[in-house]
Amino acid sequence: MIAIAQLPSAGRVLAGVAGGVAVAALLAFRLAGHGGFATDPVGVLALAAGATGAAVAATRLAGVGNRRAGTLATWLCAALLANLVLAALAVWMVTAGHPAAAIAVAAWNSAWIPPLALMQLTASAAIRTGARAPWTHPVLAAASGPVTLANALLTTASEPFTGLPTIAPEDWRTALEPVGTFATLLGVLALVLVPVTLWRAALGSEGSARARIGVAAAGASAAPLTVCFCLLLAVARDPGAVEPSLGSVAFLVALAGASMFSTACALIAARGGVEGRQVAIVVRGAGLAGAALVVIGIGTIIAAPGLRLGASSVAFLVAAVTVVVGGGAWAGTGRLARALAPQHAQHPQAPQHPQHPQAPNDKGLAAPAGGATVTGLTPREAEVLAVLAEGASNAGIAAQLVVSERTVDAHLRAIFVKLGLTPGAETNRRVRAARIWLDHAAGNRGPQGLSKAD
């Protein structure tokens, strides 16, 4: 919580204080004998750690010049703290028999949805330049709002209830169930949209652009993985017969861990110059987390009392599933990490700004890192050329500059014409254009890598 107070905004400091009070209140309720997973110290401290990590990431993202991602990380921190505040409020109201206790529980029961959207937006914003947001961002925000509202209005705790209910289905009821099901499907589809577009842009690019976009895509993938974990908790409950409170605490830990993973990916992507080692850690982390979910789900079904398997059979089958799924995930993520890692020998990398290889000019656009625009190109065309030199595909350029692929294609045609690059069988115009940009940037830098203007 201390990191939140270091942020410049008074509102953030107030949110940190409220979160700290909520943590203290929840732990005090636990010591006073109020059970339930909402007051479990593991879940409470995990959410507090996730909020602190988001606050630190917000500061560092702003420090490398990506204010949009820093702002979204701040909102992620606030959303995690709101979860704690609403939990403390709900516990107090339920304990006191307050008439509005059911409303408080409903609000708390929906507080886990906004962080999922915010962790995706933070990771995605880390690679963007300019003031515009990609079309996937407003779509995700527009879907998350109604889903959160529908969950709060339609899902209520069974009456009467003592303490806060767990995730066990029998502790909750849903009014207008078809509407609730539709809202759930809408939310799941919205959470898949950002990772899919980022992975498409990453896998179509090369060099440092592929690495940066791939890291952001991995960070955005944490949200749908968390939803998958939530669904597996239902399997663990029935037929797995796992204690609901234990599963609920595990979900809070997963939510906090996913937020920290997403903000860490945002930091890596925003700083630029992504290393192969960083790509490997991020990709393997996301892939192995997904593999663990598969193993848990299958293992829970295998161990279900209804199958009546002996302890030895269960242990053998779970071990076999772990080896097959874990080994496949390790091999697959290794190949993906190698594919995403920047290949410097094939794509020489231009001198980079910590967040992007361009610096803003006086028109609010970007010019090559050498400090001058390539002769004959508009500032926007120079910006497109700079991202192209990183190895980005048209989709990758569009993702980072927040324009359509059609606009990117039009800019590239103009760039090729102005640079005198005609289609040829022996050389690729994209490679030749990238080489011109790299040579131009290198020619405008001094012996220590400083521009001649410095």
Image (cartoon, helix red, strand yellow):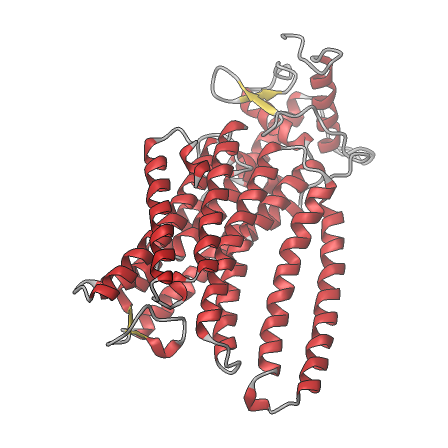
- The residue furthest top is 453
Residue at image point 48% right, 81% down: 238
**Residue 175 in picture, x, y percent from top left:** 27, 73
- The residue furthest front is 32
Total numbered labels placed on residues in the image: 0
**Residue 352 in picture, x, y percent from top left:** 66, 25
Residue 73 vs 95, above or below: the answer is above
Residue 181 vs 51, above or below: the answer is below
Position of 257 with respect to 1 (left or right) is right
Q: Quadrant of the N terminus?
A: top left
Residue at image point 59% right, 67% down: 293
**Residue 106 in picture, x, y percent from top left:** 28, 63
Residue 8 vs 50, above or below: the answer is above
Question: Does the rendering let one see residue 111?
Answer: no
Position of 355 with respect to 72 (left or right) is right
Q: Quadrant of the C terminus?
A: top right
Q: Which one is nearer the viewer's eye here, 388 or 420?
A: 388
Residue 318 vs 327, above or below: the answer is below
**Residue 198 in picture, x, y percent from top left:** 57, 47
